[in-house]
Image: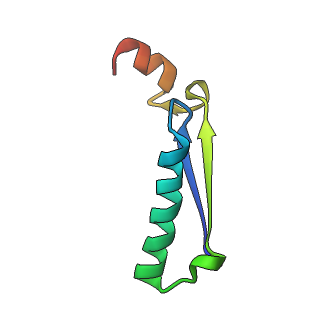
Amino acid sequence: MPFVNIRITDDGTTAAQKQQLIAGVTQLLVEVLGKNPATTVVVIDEVPTDNWGIGGESITARRQRGD
């Protein structure tokens, strides 16, 4: 039973986009590894940009700066 965890920032990903991710990752595991889609689990965690950091600063701060 494959388990895939996708972490993204919580800045506007739609339900339709998340559904595409779930379907796409599931299909990739079917095609590449021959996994059963009925037992493939995909979880999407949305992390606030204040809680996601790169290079010592939050994504929120980087985006406010225009990076």
Q: Residue at x 50, y 20 (%)?
A: 60
Residue 58 picture location, percent across and down = 52, 24
Q: Position of residue 27 (x, y in %)?
A: 46, 72
Using the image as rendered, state which of residue 36 and residue 46 is in the foreground: 36
Residue 5 falls in image quadrant? bottom right
Residue 32 left/right relative to 56: left
Considering the image in quadrants, where does the C terminus appear? top left
Residue 42 appears in the figure: yes
**Residue 28, relative to residue 57: is it above or below?**
below
In the picture, measured across the screen, residue 1 lies left or right of residue 54, that is right
> Measured from the top left, where is residue 20 in percent x and y?
47, 55
66 vs 44: above or below:
above
Q: Residue at x 41, y 80 (%)?
A: 31
Left or right: residue 11 compared with residue 3: left
Q: Which quadrant, please, contains the N terminus? A: bottom right
Instruction: In this rendered view, identify the residue nearer to me: 38 or 55.
Output: 38
